[in-house]
Image: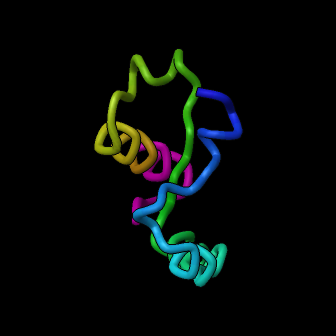
Amino acid sequence: MSTREADDLRPEYPSELIQSGVRGKYAARYREGTNIVLIDPELQKHYPDSDAVNRALREHLAQHSGGAT
């Protein structure tokens, strides 16, 4: 299958449906509901999930700012 054939719309999908979409329509709403931070691989060994990261950050805050939130 050539690249051109792979890019063609299948006959069961009406082109009007595809063209009626709005690019980025929900992007702002999605960004408001997410808070993603990527950590380096060597840190991931010590902080494997959100709970571990949150616990470490709260401990850091408690030690450096007089209390955790």
Determine the residue located farthest toward the front in the rendered image. Answer: 11
For the residue pair 6 and 63, the one nearer the viewer reads as 6
Q: Main secondary structure of the magenta part?
A: helix
Depth check, front residue: 35 or 22: 22
Q: Which of the image's four quarters has the C terminus?
A: bottom left
The number of numbered badges drawn on the structure is 0
Residue under the point 56% across and 70% down: 31
User: What range of the chain is rendered magenta?
Assistant: 59-69
Q: Residue at 37%, 47% (x, y): give it.
A: 54
Q: Is residue 63 magenta?
A: yes
> Who is closer to the viewer here, 7 or 36?
7
Q: Please, is residue 45 above or below residue 37 in the view?
A: above
Q: Residue at x 48, y 43 (%)?
A: 60
Q: x, y percentage for residue 62? A: 43, 51
Compared with residue 69, is residue 26 higher up or lower down, i.e. above or below?
A: below
Q: Report whether 9 appears left or right of 68.
A: right
Q: Is residue 63 left or right of residue 19?
A: left
Instruction: Specify the color scheme.
Output: rainbow
**Does 47 sit above or below residue 9?**
above
Q: Position of residue 67 (x, y in %)?
A: 43, 60
Nearer-the-camera pick, 49 or 11: 11
Quarter assignment of residue 20: bottom right
Image quadrant containing the N terminus:
top right
Q: Residue furthest right?
A: 4
| Residue drawn at 56 percent across, 39 percent down | 38
